[in-house]
Amino acid sequence: MTYWHIFLAFFIPGILGYGGGPASIPLVENEVVKRYEWMTVQEFSEVLALGNSLPGPIATKMAGYIGYEQGGILGASIGVFATVAPSLIIMIILLGLLHKYKDSPKVKRMTLYVRPVIAILLGIMAWRFFQESYVAIGLWQMSLITISSYLLIERMRVHPAIVIGGALTYGALML
């Protein structure tokens, strides 16, 4: 029954919390603190602070931690799955609809309009990364990593995962 409660405690906020993790935090608090009484408000605020200090989505980190506290590794897995399940279900349904109507002129037009928007968003993200890297590590270090990554991936055909691992290792040792 504990695993079912863990599932419900994170699945329901995932359905109702429109706007992602930050929007679902009060809903998770209601489930965890008030409904199941797994934590006090103080403990929940500490978990929230810990989750905010780590990279990645807040809702899944909290689900993993609280699920682990209540049901071990299986509880953590169930909590994380319950958090992402609503989005996963909707994406599967939408993908099914998209696949069903893939030959529709409207769907083809829609994908034509979406591609440039994605390219612009990726460009903006790359520019922000460039700005943050320039400020954080300086022009020379950033240029070395950028040029090396480009040459390794595009010219020497090294797998991107290896290049990322190398850049992380370089950053850990040199920066």
Image (cartoon, rainbow, N blue to C red):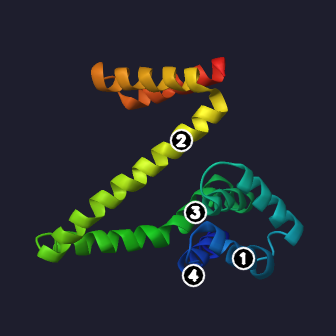
State which tag comes first along the sequence, 3 or 1: 1
Q: How many angstroms separate mark 2 from mark 3 (CA)?
A: 34 Å
Q: Residues within 10 Å of mark 4 (few under 14, many from 20)?
A: few
Decide if residue 8 is on the left or right side of residue 102. Answer: right
- The residue where tag 3 is placed is 78
Instruction: Please say if the residues under marks 2 and 1 sit with CB atoms less than 8 Å apart.
Output: no
Q: Residues within 10 Å of mark 1 (few under 14, many from 20)?
A: few
What is the x, y in percent for residue 160?
Answer: 39, 30
Quadrant (top left, top right, bottom left, bottom right) of the N terminus: bottom right
Instruction: Please say if the residues under marks 2 and 3 sit with CB atoms less than 8 Å apart.
Output: no
Residue 31: quarter of image? bottom right
Q: Residues within 10 Å of mark 3 (few under 14, many from 20)?
A: many
Instruction: Please say if the residues under marks 3 and 4 sit with CB atoms less than 8 Å apart.
Output: no
- The residue where tag 1 is placed is 26
Q: How many angstroms separate mark 2 from mark 1 (CA)?
A: 31 Å
Looking at the rendered structure, the secondary structure element under dot 3 is helix
State which tag comes first along the sequence, 4 or 1: 4
Name the front one of labels 3 and 1: 1
What is the x, y in percent for residue 52?
Answer: 72, 56
Task: Specify the label residue 16 is tagged with.
Answer: 4
Looking at the rendered structure, the secondary structure element under dot 4 is helix
Q: How many angstroms separate mark 3 from mark 4 (CA)?
A: 18 Å
